[in-house]
Amino acid sequence: MRDLTVAVFRPDDERLEDAVELIDSLGATAVPDPMLAVEPTGSPPRTDADCVVLTSKTGAELVADAGWEPGEATVCAIGPRTADALREVGYDVDTVPEEYTSSGLVATLEGAVDGARVEVARSDHGSPVLLDGLEAAGAYVHETVLYRLVRPAGSGDSTERAAAGTLDAACFTSSLTVEHWLEAADERGNRDEALEGLTEATVGVIGEPTRETAADAGIDVDLVASEATFDALACETVEAAAPTYHE
């Protein structure tokens, strides 16, 4: 019986290392296939905001490297991982929503930002839900793009496995990882076969927007993680895949 193989698409840094370690600890074999690479823009957040929102560990590290100071602004993190990253580089975090999503953060802030200047500092692929929701709550919203997310050259090994029928599960962590996975399959000329292979695999996604993107592309999604974290996604995907794996 071969090992349960699980594709993970985290950026090629400690996040990918942590993902591989977690999958291995669950008794499966990780198939690391980075679908995201970071290109910093060099643009720091504004310093005159009443509230500043950061949405990733990468963003936290970039604002720290730029020497950004929040002043009297309320600092908000979209989830505990981002909050931990901000604290590690020396920032105090005032707000973390109970639901670690853009809509969850809007729900947490909507009663407190009417008339406030809100700075959203994130990647170039951030969800419009956050900006639209804060504006609807009465905030004056400004977005700073801290970095661009691109597909690394050479990505797509997992599409070969899917096409060959040797990929048992996949963990998509954003709509962009889905889009880049499909681009990699197109580049390798195996899109139809790879999509067919995914129908036999267990596909987990990190949230509803990712599920919608996958479904629109013809990918059957087996589960949406109960919590918008990679740990929850990985654990639940492996658990869903393992009971039906008997080869």
Image (tube, grey):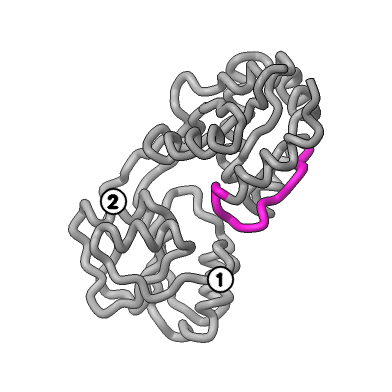
The spot of residue 217 in percent (x, y) is: 73, 36
10 in magenta: no
Up/down of 176 relative to 50, above or below:
above
Write the residue at 37% across / 76% down.
Answer: 94
Q: In the figure, is residue 236 to the left or right of 47?
A: right
**Tag nearer the camera, 1 or 2:** 1
At label 2, counting other C-alpha atoms closer than 10 Å, the crowd grade (few under 14, some 14-19, many 20 or more) is: many
In the image, the segment drawn in magenta is 220-231
| Quarter of the picture holding the N terminus | top right
Q: Which residue is mark 2?
A: 62
**Residue visible at 70% across and 50% down in the picture:** 224
Locate residue 244, reporting x and y percent.
81, 33
Please tell me whether the stretch drawn in magenta is mainly helix, strand or loop: loop
**Residue type pointed to by label 2:** Leu
Viewer-side residue, 216 vs 32? 32
Q: Is residue 85 left or right of residue 177?
A: left
On screen, residue 38 above or below 229: above
The kind of residue tagged 1 is Glu
Quote the CA–CA distance across marks 1 and 2: 25 Å
Q: How many marks?
A: 2
- Give x and y (percent) for residue 95: 43, 74
Residue assigned mark 1: 98
Pick the quarter of the image with the C terminus. Answer: top right
Label 1, secondary structure: give it.
Answer: loop
Quarter of image, res 84: bottom left
Label whose residue precedes the other's in the sequence (1 or 2) = 2
